[in-house]
Amino acid sequence: MSSGQAKYGAAAREDGFETRDFYLACFLRCTGYELLDLRAEGRRKVFVFRDQPCRRDDVLSFYGDGAMVPPLAFSTTVKDMKALLHNA
């Protein structure tokens, strides 16, 4: 598993879903996932979201280029998440 990919199973919090992929994290925020935590892992950050039953399909949709989000909402979310990274 590359460091940009999501973590599944025991490494993820019981009620959460973890990813190091910044743009996936932005997509999840944009589609309504609640950000539970942002924690440091070395020089990188790990985004922890409240898991949802449809998460697997949402992640596959994102990586398969089948997801639809409003472009301006995504752009705003990217800016907000970058600010969160730099101020955390």
Image (cartoon, grey):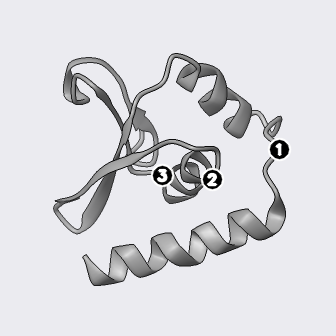
Mark 1 or mark 3: name the one nearer the start of the chain. 3
| Front label number (1 vs 3) | 1
- Is disc 1 surrounded by few (<14), some (14 to 19) or many (20+) residues within 10 Å? few
Disc 2 to disc 1, how far (Cα)? 10 Å
Mark 1 sits on what residue? 68
Residue lying at 25% horizontally and 76% vertically, measured from the top left: 88
Q: Is residue 39 left or right of residue 66?
A: left
The image position of residue 84, as x and y in percent, is 38, 74
Q: Secondary structure at mark 2?
A: helix
- Is disc 2 surrounded by few (<14), some (14 to 19) or many (20+) residues within 10 Å? some
Mark 3 or mark 2: name the one nearer the start of the chain. 3
Rendered position, 39 above or below 51: below
Q: Secondary structure at mark 3?
A: loop
Observer-nearest of 4 and 22: 22
Q: Is residue 1 visible?
A: no
Mark 2 sits on what residue? 30
